[in-house]
Amino acid sequence: MPRVAMILSLAAFALFNYGQYLGWSMFSESADAQPVRSASAARAFHK
């Protein structure tokens, strides 16, 4: 089981690095760089 967790964490890390390589930044403050993950959009979506 620890091997599976390690593989999944490495895969998530690789995906995160690939997204940063493509120019997407999780820490960007600009509105256009934010996907549909903003709090207000999620709140409206879950109504």
Image (cartoon, helix red, strand yellow):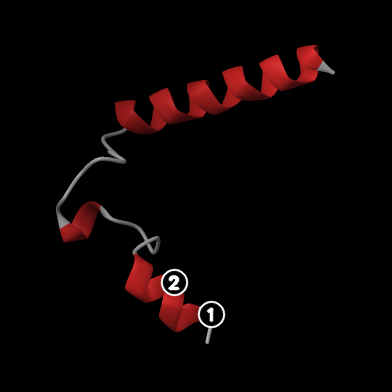
Q: Left or right: 12 with respect to 5?
A: left
Residue at 53% over, 80% down: 46
For the residue labelled by badge 1, is the local secondary structure a helix, a strand or a loop?
Answer: loop
For the residue labelled by badge 2, is the local secondary structure a helix, a strand or a loop?
Answer: helix
Residue at 36% over, 67% down: 39
Specify the amino acid type for callout 1.
His
Q: Which residue is mark 1?
A: 46
Residue at 16% over, 50% down: 29
- Name the foreground residue: 23 vs 40: 40
Q: Residue furthest top?
A: 3
Q: Which residue is mark 2?
A: 42
Above or below 47: residue 10: above
Q: Are marks 2 and 1 in contact (CB under 8 Å)?
A: yes
Q: Position of residue 11 (x, y in %)?
A: 60, 23
Above or below 3: residue 45: below
Q: Mark 2: few, some, or many residues within 10 Å (few <14, many ≥20)?
A: few
Q: Mark 1: few, some, or many residues within 10 Å (few <14, many ≥20)?
A: few
The quadrant holding residue 18 is top left
